């Protein structure tokens, strides 16, 4: 019997459009001989929709038309399937959620927590791993504690910035010197990131970053660094993909270069990377160590910087396009990748179901002595 797979995408995130692209690629690659596929789109207002109109990327050029033709859904009480959703007069039974969301409310543990509460298997990292990995500051702190090299950094909240920004800037100038990078702590796709070379630029960049998040990260700039990526997949057993190198046209690989220039992201990388075997093996070792330190499962992409030394730069628990291009270079097709992620999700879910989450004791029924 075919499994009913909900491909969930969109959500209230500045990476909303990237999520739509990822979902479209998944919908084109998934094996429909194995799965009944139900696309579920979460609008920027947080409303959930389904319908065949969601399967064509071209339709999203007119989002309002899509929303008029798609069907709103609501959740029903479970029966034999894991999850029931209803759209007009039709009821869909969902067995597993394939998450294609990026950033806020989709990659940060929020949607993962929803799936946990609804008692349904879902692809990718769990609630805690997703939440931690989505916060650049916490990720760096945790990796540093595990002796995984990260670029020197500092951070500040909006409340602290408003009361002592001069002191903080001076501290960063003394700690790093210019240039530096200013980043929102909880955004991906290089949104809100600025390279700064002066105090005035620092202030402007901080205000930009604070428009996206209440906490910002400041990093020392590793000048002339090469950028490498690889993906890691697994649960009990871990597999690392081929390593790629990002070919940058500007001083860092920003949102425009990733998704707008030349119309697609994948024109700016070299797979396999032209790197010596010692460096490649060090990247693979750090990738595995990072995956374990963050208690990940599913499929993640890890970004590295290299200039005489390798640094773990960022972790993406739901990478754009699921990083299928890295796995294809390793010999795993996109279709097979999706199969693997579904199998991992089911294995994780099965292990959780074997755990005890409640005990048969009602302390409220016990006599309480006053």
Image: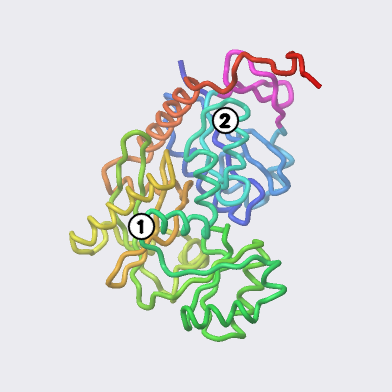
Foreground residue, 142 or 8?
142
Q: Quadrant of residue 283?
A: bottom left
Which label is found at residue 147?
1
Which residue position holds label 2? 38
Question: What is the span of residues highlighted in magenta in the rendered image?
Answer: 73-94
Q: Position of residue 71 (x, y in %)?
A: 71, 33
Q: Check if residue 76 falls in the magenta segment.
A: yes
Q: Which label lies toward us, 2 or 1?
A: 1
Which label is found at residue 347?
none
Q: Separation of disc 2 and disc 1 at Cα?
A: 43 Å
Residue at 57%, 82% (x, y): give it. Answer: 170
Q: Residue furthest front?
A: 370
Q: Residue furthest left?
A: 277
Under circle 1, the secondary element is loop
Residue at 57%, 51% (x, y): give it. Answer: 103
Foreground residue, 207 or 340?
207
Under circle 2, the secondary element is strand
Judging from the image, the colouring scheme is rainbow
Q: Position of residue 209 (x, y in %)?
A: 62, 68
Q: Quadrant of residue 224?
A: bottom left
Q: Check if residue 32 falls in the magenta segment.
A: no
Foreground residue, 3 or 341?
341
């Amino acid at each position: 019997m075919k499994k009913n797979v909900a491909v969930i995408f969109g959500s209230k995130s500045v990476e909303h459009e990237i999520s739509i692209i990822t979902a479209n690629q998944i919908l084109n690659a998934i094996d429909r001989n194995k799965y009944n596929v139900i696309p579920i789109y979460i609008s920027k207002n947080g409303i959930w929709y389904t319908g065949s109109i969601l399967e064509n990327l071209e339709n999203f050029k007119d989002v309002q038309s899509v929303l008029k033709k798609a069907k709103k859904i609501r959740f029903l009480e479970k029966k034999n399937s894991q999850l029931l959703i209803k759209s007009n007069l039709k009821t869909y039974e969902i067995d597993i959620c394939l998450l294609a969301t990026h950033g806020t409310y989709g990659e940060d543990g929020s949607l993962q927590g929803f799936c946990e509460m609804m008692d349904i298997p879902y692809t990718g990292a769990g609630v805690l791993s997703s939440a931690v990995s989505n916060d650049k500051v916490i990720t760096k702190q945790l990796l540093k504690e595990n002796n995984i090299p990260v670029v020197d950094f500092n951070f500040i909240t909006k409340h602290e910035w408003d009361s002592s920004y001069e002191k903080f800037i001076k501290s960063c100038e003394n700690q790093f010197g210019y240039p530096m990078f200013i980043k929102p702590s909880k955004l991906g796709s290089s949104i809100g990131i600025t390279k700064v070379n002066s105090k005035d630029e620092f202030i402007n960049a901080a205000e930009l970053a604070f428009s996206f998040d209440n906490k910002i990260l400041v990093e020392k700039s590793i000048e002339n660094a090469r950028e490498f990526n690889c993906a890691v997949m697994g649960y009990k057993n871990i597999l690392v993909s081929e390593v790629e190198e990002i070919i940058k046209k500007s001083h860092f690989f920003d949102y425009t270069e990733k998704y707008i220039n030349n119309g697609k992201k994948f024109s700016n990388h070299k797979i396999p990377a032209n790197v010596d075997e010692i460096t490649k093996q060090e990247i693979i070792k750090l990738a595995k160590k990072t995956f374990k330190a963050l208690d990940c499962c599913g499929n993640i992409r890890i970004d590295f910087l290299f200039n005489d030394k390798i640094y773990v730069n960022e972790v993406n628990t739901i990478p754009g396009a699921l990083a299928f291009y890295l796995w294809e270079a390793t010999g795993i097709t996109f279709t097979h990748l999706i199969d693997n992620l579904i199998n991992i999700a089911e294995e994780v879910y099965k292990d959780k179901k074997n755990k005890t989450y409640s005990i048969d004791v009602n302390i409220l029924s016990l006599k309480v002595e006053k």
